[in-house]
Every structure is written in C-alpha cells, then in structure tokens.
Image: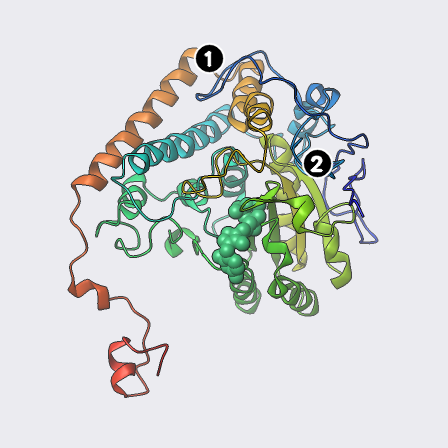
Amino acid sequence: MARTLSLPSKSKKTAPKKVVGPAASKVAAKKPAKPVKKAPAKVVSKIVVKKPVTTKALAKKSVAVRATQPTATAKAAAPSKVTSSDFSKSPFNASLKPAQKVGFLREMLRIRRFEQQALKYYNQGIMGGFLHLYNGQESVAAGTASLMNGHDEIITAYRDHGHALAVGMGMNECMAELFGKGTGCSKGKGGSMHFFAPDKHYWGGHGIVAGQTPLGLGLAFAIKYKKINGCAVAFLGDGAVNQGVFSECLNMAALWDLPIVYVIENNGYSMGTSLERSSAVNGSLAKRAEGFCVEWATCGGFDLYELRANLGAAMERARKESKPMVLEVSTYRYYGHSVADANAKKYRAPEEIERYKVDYDPITLWQNQLLKEKVVTQAQIEKIDAEAKAEAAAAAEFGIASPWPTEESIFEDIYHEVDHKTEAGQTGRFFFSE
Ligand SMILES: Cc1ncc(C[n+]2csc(CCOP(=O)(O)OP(=O)(O)O)c2C)c(N)n1
Ligand SMILES: [Mg+2]
C-alpha cells in the first residue's frame, strides 16, 4: 500500500503543557508533490544573494521536492509557514546583537567553504577515505553551537564537519584530519567521521548509525549526576531513528529524566533511500517519542531564527527541568551520502537538489534576512565569504604540508586495559579478539 507522509500543519506535542516557545512549524503538503519540470534558472554552485525570501513566501510556493518518489505525498523538508520575522521575536533571538547575527553568517560560510575546499582535493585524489558533506545543513550546526551555554555537550554522527567548526575547532586541525595527517584533530587516524574536541564540549563524530545516541545519553546522565547547569544535544539522521538503540535511549531518558535533546536532522534520505521508503511515519519521526512519554516537536532547519527559537526552547527545558525531548528538524543535503556516492543524482531528481539550493539554502536565507535588517551590507558579506575561502585554502595547504602519522603512532591513543595484564591488554593490539 502506498504510504503517505502528510505532516500536520501545526506543531503537535504529546505533553500536557506547551514547552517549545514559538510554534514548532510543520507544513502539510497534502497534494502529491508535483515533479519539477525544469531546473531553476540559476544553478547555485556558489552562494547567491537575491531578493529576500521569507519563509512565508516560501510556504506559498508549491513544494515540489523529492519528486522522484512516486508514493510520496508530503515532504519532510518543507519550509515553515511562520515567517523569519516571527521567529526573530522569540526570546532566543530578540536580544541578538548585530555582531552575533553576522557571526552566525560567518560560521555557516566557514563550514561551506571548508567542505568545498575538501571536496576539491578529494576529487583530485589527493584526499582519501570517506567524506560526508554537510552542505545545505549548515544552519543546524551553527544554530546549535550558538545556543550552547558553556556546560552543554554535543555529539553527532559521521556528518560531523559542520558541528566541529561551529563549536570552534580550527580549520587546520580538521582539514589535516581529512588528509590523514598527524597534525589532524585525531592525529590522522580518524578521518572525516571522527572529529572530536571534548574541550569544546564536542564528543564527535561516530560512524555507527545511532551509535552516538546512547553516548549522548551518557553525557546527559553525567550532567545530571554532577548537577551541572547544562544539557546534552545528540544529533541523528532520519535513518538512524530506525535503529533499536535509539528507542532504548528514549526509554531510559524518560525513566531517568535525563537532560537531553535528540535532534533528528531530517534531510530526507539515508544513503540512497528516501524517508518514504525507509521509515513508517505517522506525521513525523519525532512523534515516535510519544511511545516513551518523551516530548517532541518539529521545526524547519533552513531559517536560523526558526531553528534557534525551537532548539533554544528545547535546550532550556532540558537544562531547567531535566527532561528529554526529541526535535525533528527539516533540512537537506546537496551532495550524495558521501562523496563516493556515485548515485547521488539517481535516487532523487537533480531538479530537486537545485530547488533546495535556490529556494531553501540556509546561508542565502540568512544573508537575505540580515540584508533586510540592514545589519550587514553586500560588500561585508563578500568580504566575510572571501575570508572564509582564504581560511579554507590555507587549511588545505597546512593539511597537505603536514607530516603523515608515524608508524609507531598507530599503537598510540588506543584504549587498552591496564588492570588486566595479558599481552593483549598491554598493547591493545588484540583488544577485540582477546
Ligand atoms: C549500524 C550501522 N548500520 C548501517 C550503516 C551504514 N550506513 C552508514 S550511513 C547510513 C544512513 C544513515 O542515514 P541518516 O541517519 O539519515 O543520516 P544522513 O546520512 O542522512 O546524515 C547507513 C545505513 C552504519 N554505518 N552503521
Ligand atoms: Mg538522512
């Protein structure tokens, strides 16, 4: 039977009381998505500054997205019906200073330019391994980092570059890690999926789908146990939601009242499988939290104000009431699952990708918003972008010029037992086969 995914037009929550300040936005797309006939005129390989587009205006347009999926009638990554200006009045946005707003733009541009630089070297064969790009989703990481209070902890999956840069990791250590060099943040032994900076409250970078969800729960447990005024934010994809361990986490989070926000970055696809084909969805993925008595909400992730308003409220509640919550955020990735995904344009129409780039690009939307508010000029945007590009290029040079890890270092930083004195326990070499 064809499965439909009509999202309710209003935010729904299970709890008796409302916890997320502004209505978390959901958009119903009741009619079958219309295939996009032709690609938008402008191919956005670079960030385009165009006439301000409000999320309200976007909502009026037919959301012809993911048109390749025959059974899909509603789309997860629909724009909000509420305007950016509405969300700008949220308590989490109203007192933002112009410099902070411009700072968010800088962060998103840095992430975009960093990844584009990496892609260049990957395509040239100079960089190897995996490379899961976050292009299109930058607002989620930048928005989250901007809400962290110094005691909050975050953890994510393998699409981790954006979160890393947003929490303040340097481009050099991140780029060098991508090149597999000893100067990388994981000494060249982790690569793209394993960026870490516990000193910046960032716990990585995990390749096992949903593997980060119980680890995030552990962070939340520690926060509660130590009576810290913070929360844990654990990101997961729309595919990861189907992993059993996530259900176990929700159960335990509810039982123990743990201060965690699970942010589902719903980009519509798990590798080459669309949401419609991979998940049984009753309105939203977040709604599954109901089964565990956990609060949930959904919101758009394209507009930074909207993201901050909703996630800010969820994090605040986790900190103050020590309660878990699931927030599903609509977003979109421009590239394939990883750069090695040869089918990136086969399981979704190229027009769909262009549509998101043109109409929903989080950087373009934010630039336009800031231009509208007159907190930045076009010339300033260009300068910030040029700086981000130069920083990324310099980081690539640093990575290329850096030394490889030494042979001996392969046995360093390996977790091994010190209280169980077998040969394996001493060297760590046979840790898993002991
Ligand atoms: C336990 C496990 N099963 C399968 C995989 C292979 N795998 C890697 S990514 C992925 C899809 C996950 O998609 P999603 O959670 O939506 O995240 P996104 O890539 O969209 O960010 C799969 C199945 C894995 N790494 N771990
Ligand atoms: Mg996904």
User: Where's residue 403, x and y in %?
Assistant: 15, 48
Looking at the image, is 18 positioned above or below residue 80? below
Task: State the residue at coordinates (73%, 55%).
Answer: 288
User: Where's residue 195, x and y in %?
Assistant: 37, 51
Can residue 152 be spotted in the picture? no
Give 407 or 372, whichever is nearer the viewer.
407
The answer to whether mark 2 and mark 1 are in CB contact below 8 A is: no
Of labels 2 and 1, earlier in sequence is 2
Q: Quadrant of the C terminus?
A: bottom left
Give 110 or 123, whichever is nearer the viewer.
123
**Residue 368 numbered mark, or none:** none
Q: Is residue 302 left or right of residue 401?
A: right
- Foreground disc of the pair 2, 1: 2
Q: Secondary structure at mark 1?
A: loop
Counting every numbered tag in the picture gives 2
Q: Pointer 1: what residue? A: 377
Residue 26, located in which quarter of the rendered image?
Answer: top right
Residue type at mark 1? Answer: Thr
Task: State the residue at coordinates (73%, 22%).
Answer: 62
Q: Pointer 2: what residue? A: 75
Residue 161, located in which quarter of the rendered image?
Answer: top left
Give 297 or 281, whichever is nearer the viewer.
281
Can residue 337 be spotted in the picture? yes
- How far apart in space, not on screen, are marks 2 and 1 (Cα)? 34 Å
Q: Secondary structure at mark 2?
A: loop
Q: Is residue 427 left or right of residue 30?
A: left
Q: Residues within 10 Å of mark 1 (few under 14, many from 20)?
A: some
